[in-house]
Image (cartoon, helix red, strand yellow):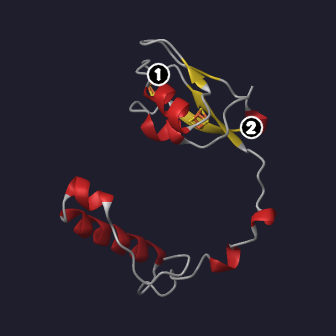
Amino acid sequence: MAVGASTVQVGTAAMWGGYGVVEKLVRGLNRYLDGKEFPDLSPVIGAALPKIVEFQEIPLTIRARARADDTCDGCLLCVTACADGGFNAISGVKGEVVTIDGAKCDGCGLCVMVCPTGSIAMVPRPLFH
Ligand code: SF4
Ligand code: SF4
C-alpha cells in the first residue's frame, strides 16, 4: 500500500493459518493506524513513492553483517538457511555455537529470521571486530 496499492491480497498466510488470519491482519492494521493517528489508509497509500529511485541510485554497499552470540545451541538451522538461501557464510557443528564468516556474509538477515533462540543479530559492519 505504501507503494500505491489501494488493496492487497493474502495467499500463503491464509493457507497456513486459515481465514482467521484476515481478522488478525485487520486488527494489526488498525493498531498501526491508531498508533500513527491516521484516520484511515489514505496517508499510507503511496507514501513511499517519493523515495523510490533508479536502480543506479541505490547504495549497494553492505552495511551490516550477522553475528551469533553464545546463546546459540547449535541447532544448525541458520547454517542450512545461509547455505541454501544466503551466501554459505555460516559453519558449525551440531550442539556448538556457530561461526559466521563476515567476509562472506552479505547482510541478508535470513539467519536472524530462522534462529529459534534469537542468537543472531545484525551488526553494523564498521563496528564489527
Ligand atoms: S545475514 Fe545472510 S549471508 Fe549473512 S550469515 Fe545470515 S543468512 Fe548468511
Ligand atoms: S539458528 Fe540460532 S541457535 Fe541454531 S545454530 Fe544458528 S545461531 Fe545457533
Give the image location of residue 12, x and y in percent. 31, 58
Taking the spot 42% from the left edge, 76% from the top edge, the residue there is: 33
Q: What element carries label 1?
A: loop
Residue 128 lies, with reference to residue 124, above or below; the image says above
Q: Is the residue marked by circle 1 packed among few (<14), some (14-19), or many (20+) residues within 10 Å? A: some
Q: Mark 1 points at which residue?
A: 72
Farthest front residue in view: 84
**Looking at the picture, which amino acid does disc 2 mark?**
Arg
In the figure, 12 relative to 49: above or below? above
Q: Give how far apart the Cα atoms at labels 2 and 1 are.
A: 21 Å
Of 11 and 113, the residue lying toward us: 11
Amino acid type of the residue tagged 1 in the rendering: Cys
Which residue is pictured at 48% across the width and 88% down the height? 42
101 left or right, relative to 129:
left
In the image, is 29 to the left or to the right of 108? left
Q: Count how many numbered circles sit on residues in the image.
A: 2
Q: Residue 11 carries which label?
A: none
On the rendered structure, is 33 left or right of 25?
right
Is the residue marked 1 within 8 Å of ligand 2, measured from its CB?
yes
Give the residue pinned by disc 2.
125
